[in-house]
Image: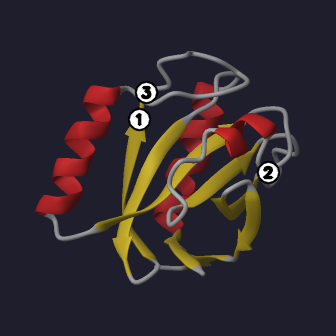
Amino acid sequence: MLEIPRTIFRQMVEQAETEAPIEACGILAGDNGRIEKLYKMTNVDNSSEHFMMEPKEQFAVAKDIRARGLKMLAIYHSHPTAPARPSDEDIRLSLMPDVTYVIVSLKEPSPPVIKGFLIKDGAITKVPIKVLER
């Protein structure tokens, strides 16, 4: 299970809505399945169908996560017009089997749908997401 504070949940949704129709993306860090920090990233592909994070930003985020004593728990991105499920490209490009892939779907914007997945060797496992009220 991935626990996401409501404030971070809202930040992901707001980023997805603001950057639409481009896919928004970012990294979620924390410990023991609980998210503590959101890092908004730049989609350098500037695409509505896929995302690629800016490498310099990724390096800086990795350093900050280590400095804070946290772990990268999830990579998130939005699907502006598609459901909250991994696309064929999401599956092909998932290179971190121990990191949850969180997808924010704006297909039905009220409310947006957020789902989590572990992807390993093409196999997809759903990860429950609990939004915390704090």
| Residue type at numbered disc 2 | Ala
* Residue 9 point in image, percent of width and height: 55, 60
For residue 58, side relative to residue 85 (left or right): left
SS state under label 2? loop
Residue holding disc 2: 84
Classify the position of the C terminus by image quarter.
bottom left
Q: CA distance from mark 1 to mark 2?
A: 19 Å
- Mark 3 touching mark 1, by CB under 8 A? yes
Q: Secondary structure at mark 1?
A: strand
Pick whichever, 15 or 95, lies toward us.
95
In contact (CB < 8 Å): disc 2 and disc 3? no
Dot 3: element = loop
Q: Is residue 109 above or below residue 3?
A: above
Label 3 – label 1 distance at C-alpha: 4 Å
Q: Residue at x 80, y 38 (%)?
A: 88
The residue tagged 3 is 42
Q: Amino acid at mark 3?
A: Thr
* Mark number displayed over residue 41: 1
